[in-house]
Amino acid sequence: MSVIEQEQLTSLIGEIEDYARGYGLDFFPVIFEMLDYEEINMIASYGGFPTRYPHWRFGMQYEYMQKSYGYGLHKIYEMVINNNPCYAYLLNSNQIVDQKLVIAHVYAHCDFFKNNAYFRNTNRRMMDEMANHGNRIADYMSTYGRDVVEDFIDVCSSLENLIDPNALFEPDERREETASEEVSPARDVARLKSKSYMDPYINPPEYLEQQRRAMDEARANKQFPARPAKDVLRFLIEYAPLPNWKRDILCMIREEAYYFAPQAQTKIMNEGWASYWHEKIMTQKALSASELVDFADHHSSTLAVHPGHLNPYKLGYELYHDIERRWDTGRFGKEYDECDDIARKAAWRRDTGEGREKIFQVRAIYNDMTFVDEFLTEEFCHEHKLFTYSLNERNGRYEIADRDFRAVKEKLLFQLTNLGHPFIGVVDANFDNRGELYLKHRFDGVELRADYAKATMEALYRVWTRPVHVQTTVGEATVVLTYDGSTHRERALSPADAA
Amino acid sequence: MIQRIDRDLNRFRQVVRGIVKKELRKFMVTGELVGRQGRDYVSIPIRQIEIPTFRHETRRFGGVGQGDGDPGTPIGQAEGDGKGPAGDAPGDHMVEVEVALAELARIMAEELELPNIKPKSKDVIEAEHGKFTGIHKNGPESLRHFRRTFREALKRQIASGAYDFAHPVIVPIKDDKRYRARRTVHAPETNAVIFYLMDVSGSMGDEQKDVVRNESFWINTWLRHQYKGVVTRFIVHDAEAREVDEHTFFHTRESGGTRISSAYQLAADLIESECPPSEFNVYLFHFSDGDNWGGGDTQVCVKLLNERLLPAANLFCYGQVASPYGSGAFINDLGGAFKGIDNVVLAEINSRDEIYDSIKKFLGKGR
């Protein structure tokens, strides 16, 4: 990049930062870096971090990105990293108008990272942490061999979605409490105090014996873990028989998974927020008249809708606008919600003017699931022509199934629940009293993908080193999938057992 | 900065290589790779490599979209072909990876345990190359070496005191001029010519030709790896033989009878006139369903092989493709006549599954 461009860009960045602050956006300092497409593809392959541990899947990502860039199918304009300071990467071949747009976009993302509640507990020094992980894993590789370590990373990556995104907000006391429950209670039956000659009467031996037996039985039947462990990775870290280096790798993978989880939880909100603000900043402040057409072209392609896909940028953007409009015109609250006169609702007008304030509040305390649940209204659904689609088995095509508001919302919420991953938790770590791991899939109407489930169970076995069971639902039946280290088995559970 | 990703990219390529190696037999049997090769690369379709996790079976589940259309409006094709039980095959996405032909040949060598081809003999085949590496005082102006000439002129002018530092003009005279000169280099010749001979009589169907095409792909891949320049020639025959281009070779269909000797005759003529064994490593691959005309033609074939083809060829391979019409006697006749001869390989290819073994047999000689 020439010096002039460098200077121009620096002043642009300062200018847009002022606009953003002027609108009330609040962000960490942002460090911008200009990269060419190869570099930006590389950083994107590493999930946004310049330094990570070595693994072939990053190379795979890179290969696909390079290819699709080469064929003109896909181009990364910018990338922002949730970190303090925030790092933002811009593609150096962007035109000036594109740079303005993405800089504005970046500031809104940074505001979101800083202020959204779901990011509260993320590591703001992740850039350093990732580099540390890289070094530690490289050390293990030189000690234990590259193939061995990479192989174990494959195993861990297979399990990385077995986390509980809500655990980020679990107060420490509750963790303590779960830990203390595991301490075994008194070893013997309590006796009443008595003089020795009265003892057989006050503490009758038969009764003591009975109590002791009941206690033993209770101990034998005691479930471990006491409560189903949703954070399977944490459970494995604490209880699986792993050598220290493997435990450490599993810890790192888990930490990274938790770091990325809030981003997956707020994709619609975050992209919507950034699109909302790049548009505001551009159209009200930064855009010069000659750039209008290019801006409109780029902006509309960002928000473009392809049939069968829900563009998170578009959905979030429109929802923020909808919220702003509703709170500006007083279309909220008990009176509005309970009004069933369509004409009156359409003409509703109460000059509240709280729209801007409301969306700032929304960006602070919601995630995609609660956002859609709360603000996706029936009117919105119809106005934006949302539909559900499903597979037509006869011709192998996806076809529009339904435009019913409730069906749309239900399907959308399902996709957003638990990041779209199935709910799977450890219910028994000593199954059959043989130290086997028993997991339960909470069935929500969609089955597990069988081939992937099998492969994942093989990975679980590698960590737990004892047979692994997963209880799930196939068709109408409750089944238990078992992998014992060499073969996969499947058995149906009777309804009584399943309960 | 770029180096770090190169390391991971190389790892990924190794992973791909491992997959190709594991599935090599499948590729050979199905002939998936035929027609996918460019000059240096083959594009190989493999399943997208994904790290397995617990996930929902979403194929049937569908999703939420946006736009116009009534219920029932198609919005896209499901991934996979929709046949068979859904999701049984891991990963429905197919991606294409490019593997260098040389790499594919190395994978072949590892999987099929192919020996490298032993050089015929160091000095039998040798070619002369001319390289302009020398310098002469005489030569055509077109080969004048400007820099050397300039240097000589400069030296001379400084030595004779004619050089004027304030006004540095160099004027070469005839003695200064230097010319590039040709030097002859003797290099072992590494050319090979592959003759594909095929029976196109009525009894050879499309299925049989497919097998041949598949075989030829792998043979070409291997021999291209072993020799610098590989030329392929194609001869088809029924009762008469003629040389054709590659497309015709695989697509032509005649209806006449079969006289194999006609093809051998033509091959022998071509070798002698255009591809002398002193300049080429000659490979002959003949595919037929084993049905030859009676009347002593097989004896003519044996005689041709003995007298003209085998002395000239590195290797003669005969692959007999099973067809519902052929009698299949020819392979036995050859087997009887050439027992223990080193550069004759015979293989029966009764089904696609045997392609793998026949290639191993053909190329396993190391000749």
Image (cartoon, helix red, strand yellow):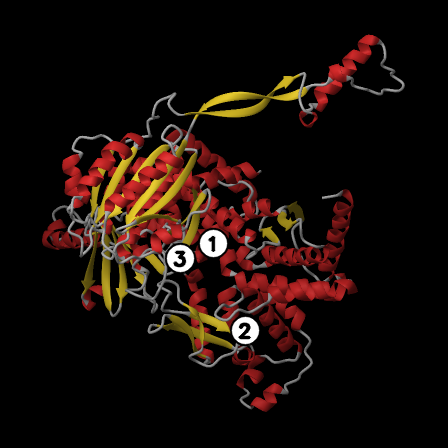
Q: Which mark is residue A168?
A: 1
- Circles 1 and 3, Cβ within 8 Å, touching? The answer is no
Q: Is residue A60 visible?
A: yes
Earlier-in-chain disc, 1 versus 2? 1
Q: Residue at x 77, y 43 (%)?
A: A3
Distance in Å between CA atoms under marks 1 and 2: 25 Å
Image quadrant occupied by the C terminus of chain B = top left
Residue closer to the observer: A213 or A311: A311
Check chain identity for marks 1 and 3: say if they share one: no
Give the structural element (helix, strand or loop) at label 2: helix
Q: Is residue A469 above or below residue B81?
A: above
Residue type beneath disc 3: His
Q: Mark 3 highlights which residue?
A: B93
Q: Residue at x 32, y 40 (%)?
A: B267
Label 1 CA crowd tier, 10 Å (few <14, some 14–19, many 20+): some
**Where is residue A289, by image quadrant?**
bottom right
Residue type beneath disc 1: Leu
Of tags 1 and 3, the one toward the viewer is: 3
Distance in Å between CA atoms under marks 1 and 3: 34 Å
Residue type beneath disc 2: Phe
Distance in Å between CA atoms under marks 3 and 2: 35 Å
Image quadrant occupied by the N terminus of chain B = top right
Q: Is residue A84 left or right of residue B22?
A: right
Check chain identity for marks 1 and 2: say if they share one: yes
Label 3 CA crowd tier, 10 Å (few <14, some 14–19, many 20+): few
Give the structural element (helix, strand or loop) at label 3: loop
Q: Position of residue A336 (x, y in %)?
A: 57, 84
Q: Position of residue B109 (x, y in %)?
A: 32, 35
